Amino acid sequence: MADKKVVFAGQVSQPAIGQGTWYMGENTRLRQKEVDALRAGIDLGLTVIDTAEMYADGGAEEVVGEALQGGLRDKVFLVSKVYPWNAGGKKAIAACEASLRRLKTEVLDLYLLHWRGNYSLAETVEVMETLIAQGKIRRWGVSNLDYSDMQELMRVRGGDACAANQVLYHLGSRGIEYDLLPWCQQQAMPVMAYCPLAQAGRLRDGLLENSTVREIAAAHGVSAAQILLAWVISHQGVIAIPKASSVAHVLENAAALNITLSRDELARLDNAFPAPGRKTPLDVV
């Protein structure tokens, strides 16, 4: 496996492709398949597993909890996210404890604010510090916060302890490259790219069908999806967290760690899907 790593909080090094769980836990008939996929990913070294209390109303966390049974918990970097309306005071404590129960673990490696809500950033930081002190989480971060939000967070007491920002990022959505991504790289703050395949390429630009993407994939003898993942993780400090609900899909995702795109290939992709030259609103799904 290629040595493509991302470091959280200057301490924990993880492979630049992890496992997302959005849409898992919604169909009980698929549960064992989802569990098997997560376990296969862990075996292949995709040790960051990202979930949230929002996904299937906790159902995704339950799938992850089942997948981690049998001694696998210590092999993963476990991430979950809290609803904005639970991100302060006693509600945050209760929400975190509920996530821990569903995940069948005593501690989260990373706990994220899913998006901004009515609780102030100061209130969220305060309760995150409380959760660390209680031993329920090891570090905290945010999700769907843009550059201006991050600057506001840095002005909050303790805000500079933020360990990651999870945002939508893929070849067809490059707005974060204008200011957010360079700033996170300067801070050595990992960016967790959700929907790195643009929800399986469902984009009006047609990522998976794009001729440039397909030509580069053919040259490497891999799939278009693998090229899209390789492009995302070619950026310093970015970890992709695609969802894979089958073992075959997990194998494909893991193999993308071994793809290195040349400067010419990166330039061709840049030409096919150029980054915006001005500030654009943060993309969310």
Image (cartoon, helix red, strand yellow):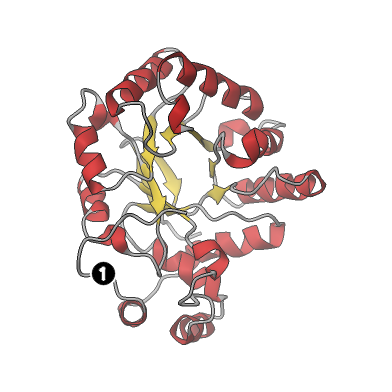
- Say if residue 72 shows up in the picture: no
Where 103 falls versus 45 (above or below)?
Answer: above
Q: Position of residue 207 (x, y in %)?
A: 48, 75
Tell me: 190 left or right of 14: left
Q: Is residue 226 above or below residue 80?
A: below
State the residue lying farthest toward the right: 29
Q: Residues within 10 Å of mark 1 (few under 14, many from 20)?
A: few
Regarding residue 203, the answer to whether it shows in the image is yes
The residue at the point 61 percent across, 65 percent down is 252
Q: Quadrant of residue 72?
A: top right
Name the secondary structure under disc 1: loop
Residue in front for this viewpoint, 85 or 166? 85
Q: Position of residue 116 (x, y in %)?
A: 37, 37
Q: Which residue is mark 1?
A: 276
Expressed as whole percent of the image width and height from the top left, the position of residue 34 reads: 71, 48
Q: Quadrant of residue 275?
A: bottom left
Q: Furthest-left residue in view? A: 155
The location of residue 195, given as percent across then percent down, is 49, 57
Residue plotted at (34% across, 36% down) = 163
- Residue at image coords 49%, 85%: 219
Q: Residue at x 35, y 24 (%)?
A: 124
Q: Amino acid at mark 1?
A: Pro
> Farthest front residue?
118
Above or below, 27 relative to 133: below
Looking at the image, residue 157 sits to the left or right of residue 40; the answer is left
